[in-house]
Image: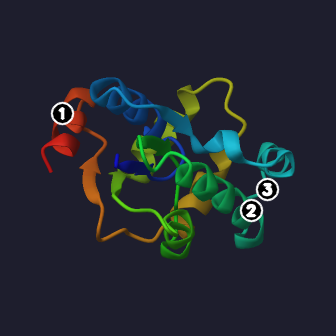
């Protein structure tokens, strides 16, 4: 049975970058949690409206169902998973879950978000992500100031 890695953190923390690098290193598939959002969630965020728990529920369940089908080979999912209750939904009936939490300051991430192109979530919603964030005590804690190579080493050596 393969591990299901959830790379978590607020928008702009580097989830996709780290997830793709880890997938390449481990030779398993990477999936971006953003791709599971229903269109109405994407439209809401694109309009600068933060998602609420009701908006996120079907999205989280879709990711969980997807992971259940990949439990055998494992995979890597980049997903904000801001709250403990969200992480509980994501991990229902999954074995071998590895949580990775990408942590950085508001200013670090704000600067990153301003440099991103072609992402539906505007930087103005970053504060709503920090407001919703609940620390995942059981996760591998990663400082986003590290290089991608250092981050991958820390994940695989933990």
Location of residue 25 with respect to 63 vertically, above or below: above
Left or right, 144 with respect to 157, comes to: right
Q: Which residue is mark 3?
A: 49
Which numbered disc, 1 or 3, marks the residue that appears first in the sequence? 3
Location of residue 150 with respect to 118 vertically, above or below: below
Q: Residue at x 57, y 59 (%)?
A: 129
Which numbered disc, 1 or 2, marks the residue that appears first in the sequence? 2
Q: Which residue is mark 2?
A: 58
How many circles with numbers are drawn on the protein?
3
Confirm whether residue 154 shows in the render. Answer: yes
Label 1 – label 2 distance at C-alpha: 34 Å
Confirm whether residue 13 shows in the render. Answer: no
Q: Which residue is mark 1?
A: 150
Label 1 – label 3 distance at C-alpha: 35 Å
Q: Which class describes the residues within 10 Å of circle 3: few (<14), some (14-19), or many (20+)? A: some
Residue 75 — which label?
Answer: none
- Nearer mark to the viewer, of 1 and 2: 2
Front-most of residues 157 and 103: 157
Location of residue 95 with respect to 30 vertically, above or below: below
Which x, y percent locates residue 66?
A: 61, 49
Which numbered disc, 2 or 3, marks the residue that appears first in the sequence? 3
Label 1's element? Answer: helix
Front-most of residues 151 and 65: 65
Left or right, 12 with respect to 51, comes to: left
Front-most of residues 70 and 106: 70
Q: Residue at x 87, y 50 (%)?
A: 40
Which x, y percent locates residue 60?
A: 64, 60
Which x, y percent locates residue 26?
A: 29, 30
- Nearer mark to the viewer, of 2 and 3: 2
Label 2's element? Answer: helix
């Amino acid at each position: 049975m393969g591990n299901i890695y959830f790379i978590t953190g607020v928008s702009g923390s580097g989830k996709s970058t780290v997830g793709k690098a880890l997938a390449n290193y481990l030779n398993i598939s990477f999936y971006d949690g953003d791709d599971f959002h229903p269109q109405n969630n994407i439209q809401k965020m694109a309009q600068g409206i933060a998602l609420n728990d009701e908006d996120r529920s079907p999205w989280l369940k879709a990711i969980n169902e997807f992971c259940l089908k990949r439990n055998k080979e494992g995979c890597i999912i980049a997903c904000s998973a801001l709250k403990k209750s969200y992480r509980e939904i994501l991990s229902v009936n999954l074995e071998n879950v590895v949580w990775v939490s990408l942590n950085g300051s508001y200013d670090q991430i704000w600067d990153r978000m301003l440099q991103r192109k072609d992402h539906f979530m505007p930087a103005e919603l970053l504060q709503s992500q920090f407001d919703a964030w609940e620390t995942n005590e059981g996760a591998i804690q990663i400082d986003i100031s590290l290089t991608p190579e250092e981050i991958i080493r820390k994940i695989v050596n933990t």
